[in-house]
Image (cartoon, coloured by chain):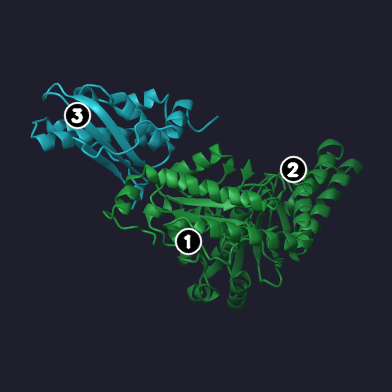
Chain colours: A green, B cyan
Amino acid sequence: MIYADNAATTAVGRAALAAMLPCLISDYGNPSSLYAFGQRAKEKLEDARARVAACLNADPKEITFTSGGSEADNQAIRSAAALGAKKGKKHIISTAFEHHAVLHTLDALKEEGFEITLLDVHENGIVTAEEVAAAIRPETCLVTVMYANNEIGTVQPIAEIGAVCREKGVLFHTDAVQAAGHLHIDVQAQNIDMLSVSGHKFHGPKGVGFLYAKKGIRLRNVIYGGGQERGKRAGTENLPAIVGMAAALEDQLLHLDENNARLIRLRDRLIAGLAKIPHSILNGDPVKRLPSNVSFCFEAIEGESMLLLLDDKGICASSGSACTSGSLDPSHVIMAIGRPHEVAHGSLRLSLGEDITEEQVDTIIREVTEVVEYLRSMSPIWRAQSEGKMDYVLK
Amino acid sequence: MALYSEKVMDHFRNPRNVGVIEDADGVGEVGNAKCGDIMKIYLKIEGEPGHEIVTDVKFETFGCGSAIASSSMATELIMGKPLSEALTLTNRAVTEALDGLPAHKLHCSVLAEEAIKAAVKDYFDRNGIAYDPELFKEGPEPSCAV
């Protein structure tokens, strides 16, 4: 099997597993218990907090552990909205291609009377700091722009957007679920006020994440209950997952530059190979993208069929086609970069893992090319296009 | 649990009757590329009006796995059958023959039924054969915001 869906989730790494096992078997105490056994768990919890904070150049007090990226996004946006509402500021700026954890939270706020501006991300999938600056109004309480897009992998100018927000006195949150553990992040240098992370995207376990919130930002609870996480997130801490995530993040950063240099080379090889398929197009900026992400649209075929056939060939990939999501509309991300509906249905995302080989990349190129040709051979659109009765959408 | 039944996967992996009939007696195309699926059915029909037989059928489909499987199954269900039977093929019969489809994929079987009906209507129109227009009333299309 060639697993090329690392943006969906990753395998738990050795570093994470080694850190987790003792917390599952021997050090299983509750960090809230006052006896030594419980306090040992508490120490591990605080050690993990210090470790993830160090990975981002943050202070441990600025880290709140959550159940994952979605919860962190919800909490960050809800907190900024509550702070804004107190001052009568009810305008939020975001982008059209955010993760649904952000977009649907913003939808909910809209119902509650907030005004939402979703910035265009252009064909290259990148919003500029100038565009953010131009959208900021006196009543803007939050700018939330994802660090790297989950479908097309484009990396946003986070430091520049952060600088603009800092200058205008607006809170800046970034959903860094796809970036953490894959790109160097420095919350101070990049002027980030809040940042969401999910553990399982970088070889940590599922069901855990964290929210970084700069000192002085008052968080609003999403989950009420006990006093864990300084009262900002109730529920007994998922200690095995938390220490696993911390170990995974540290381990990723240890090998990051070396891994990324290799990944970029293989990614570009994959892009070059798939670009040879006629009437295909790379989604997103060719350079300002995650080292692992390859996203294409292919004319006249539908994504789910592609995924099923690739699955038969042992390749795990994903698509923004409507049929893979249970709706009839293709991915909002592919639509946001201006691809017409017709070709948005034919999108394919391949997200490489650090262990991918050149041989596997060449296999993917060969198999995708075959699958696209095969599906086109039975597509009435392709026939009409190749017989000149219909225009191609992609050159 | 797999997304699709083994029958669906079999018809998706090994679709029956894919292709084009150059001298088709009836051709029907339904769906919309914007919505992500188009089905085209080609029929070869022989026999006197009122007693026609579908002697050949081919399909081309742009769509997801269940769209391709539904097209394939629908062609199998009408191959060699009287035209009257092709005309009464229901999406339900297609779905049942496939051992079911996920709820959000049922519209694929509706498209298969409609594509065959459209091809039969084309045959009637080409040959000046009278028919009850009620037979070809369009069903409610699944909405696909464009």
Q: What kind of residue is marked 2? A: Thr
Name the side, left or right, on which A226 lies relative to A272.
Answer: right
Structural crowding at the residue carrying mark 2, measured as other residues with C-alpha within 10 Å and reported as few (<14), some (14–19) or many (≥20): some
Report x, y in % for residue A154. Answer: 56, 63
Residue type, label 3 = Ile
Quadrant in which the N terminus of chain A appears: top right
> x and y percent of residue A216 in the render?
70, 66
Assign the C terminus of chain A to one quadrant of the image. Answer: bottom left
Q: Nearer the viewer, residue A229 or A97?
A: A97
Q: Where is mark 2, residue-wise? A: A236
The image shows residue A369 at horizontal and vertical percentages of: 49, 49
**Mark pair 2, 1: CA separation:** 35 Å
Q: Nearer the viewer, mark 2 or mark 1?
A: 1
Instruction: Please tell me which residue lies in front, B95 or B80.
Output: B80
Where is residue A45 shown, x and y percent of the image?
Answer: 81, 50
> Residue at 79% of width from left, 62% of height from top?
A54
* Occupied quadrant, residue B82: top left
- Measured in 3D between alpha carbons, the distance from the residue under mark 3 to the one under mark 1, in whole angstroms, is 51 Å
- Quarter of the image where one finds residue A188: bottom right
Mark closer to the observer (3, 2): 3
- Badge 2 marks a residue whose secondary structure is loop
Q: From mark 3 to mark 2, how far is it between C-alphas?
A: 70 Å
Amino acid type at image mark 1: Ala
On the picture, is B144 further left or further right than B118?
A: right
- Do the residues bearing badges 3 and 1 touch, measured as CB atoms within 8 Å? no
The subunit carrying tag 2 is A
- Which residue has dot 1 on it? A96
Q: In the rendered image, which residue does mark 3 sit on?
A: B45
Q: Does label 2 or label 1 sit earlier along the sequence? A: 1
